[in-house]
Amino acid sequence: MGQLETVRLFGIDVAVKDFAGAIAQIVHWAHQRPARTVFTCNLDHVVKLRSDRAFGEAYAGADLVVADGMPFVWLARTTRTPLPARISGSELIVPLCRTAAHEGLTVFLLGSTEERLTAAEEALREAAPDLVICGRHAPPFGFRDDPEAQHVAAEAVSRVSPDILFVALGPPTQEIWVETWRETLDCGVALCIGAGLDFLSGDIEAAPTWMRRTGLEWVWRTLQEPRRLAPRYGRILALAPLLLKDHFLDRRKRRGV
């Protein structure tokens, strides 16, 4: 499909893709081997990248990074390469699965809990009746620091060789696991989707469309999970001026100014 066009935002090379273009790229790779990786970046990722070297190494190895956050779209408008749209991992799942069903591609669900995976699988079968879900796996608590659990997950995936692997372990665990095990994963594309399967299961309610389009999804999510998410978004807001400063310094450095 040619070389990916990217724009540098917050120190990350973000693909200049619209929704349909992202799905087409993922499906194209799904027919191939070895595994490709797809990350959906947001400001929480940017903050974590400042202090997590393994996370940074995973990002450096990603094949496709799309913008899952309106701040990326807004910031891109200050460059010569604006982004066509925000592309969230959770919103990619159903249309991607419908296309996969049409193309005869298989999918695997990794992450969350067994109960939520069951509900997510039922939702996908309703949305795409012809979809082949070849497996699912809910890793145990403490997965990131458990090499044996990581190995078991990789084996579960490779045993059935899915074309599309949805990884819903949350950042940075999902991205680091994918990058660490990608050479042994027998799949076409590993797509990191955060809480995407939890939204699909119905256990967590997605924000209204108008809030997602106006960059207010974080308010909705904070109200739903205040104990877990209020500190995260508070940290992002506190660091926002510094993140912007780093972005412009990075762009100047890359231009050699």
Image: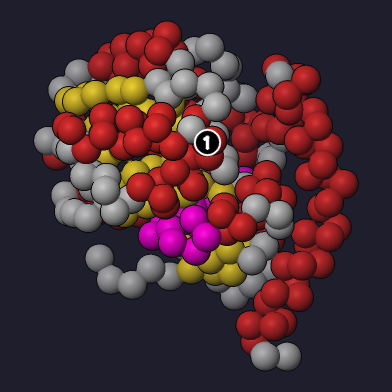
In the image as oriented, which residue stretches furthest toward the bottom?
257
From the top left corner, tell me how far across and down residue 186 is, in percent. Answer: 21, 44
**Residue 166, quarter of the rendered image:** top left
Instruction: Give the quadrant of the C terminus.
Output: bottom right
Instruction: Tell me residue 72's x, y (percent).
Output: 64, 55
Answer whether residue 228 is visible to the viewer in this image. Answer: yes
Question: Which residue is disc 1 drawn over?
Answer: 144
- On the image, the x and y values in percent for residue 216 come to 72, 35
Left or right relative to 133: residue 56: right
117, above or below 90, in the image: above
Count of marks, rendered view? 1
Q: Residue at x 40, y 21 (%)?
A: 138
Residue 86 visible here? no
Q: Which sits in the foreground, 146 or 107?
A: 146
The N terminus lies in which quarter of the figure?
bottom left
Percent across and percent down for residue 247 are 72, 67
**In this picture, is 81 found above or below 238?**
below
The answer to whether 9 appears left or right of 113 in the picture is: right
In the image, the segment drawn in magenta is 57-71
Q: Is residue 152 magenta?
A: no
* Front residue (pair 207, 243): 243
Residue found 23% across the figure and 44% down from its top: 187
Using the image as rendered, state which of residue 172 and residue 205 is in the foreground: 172
- Left or right of 9 on screen, residue 85: left
**Label 1 neighbourhood size at 10 Å, few (<14), some (14-19), many (20+)?**
some
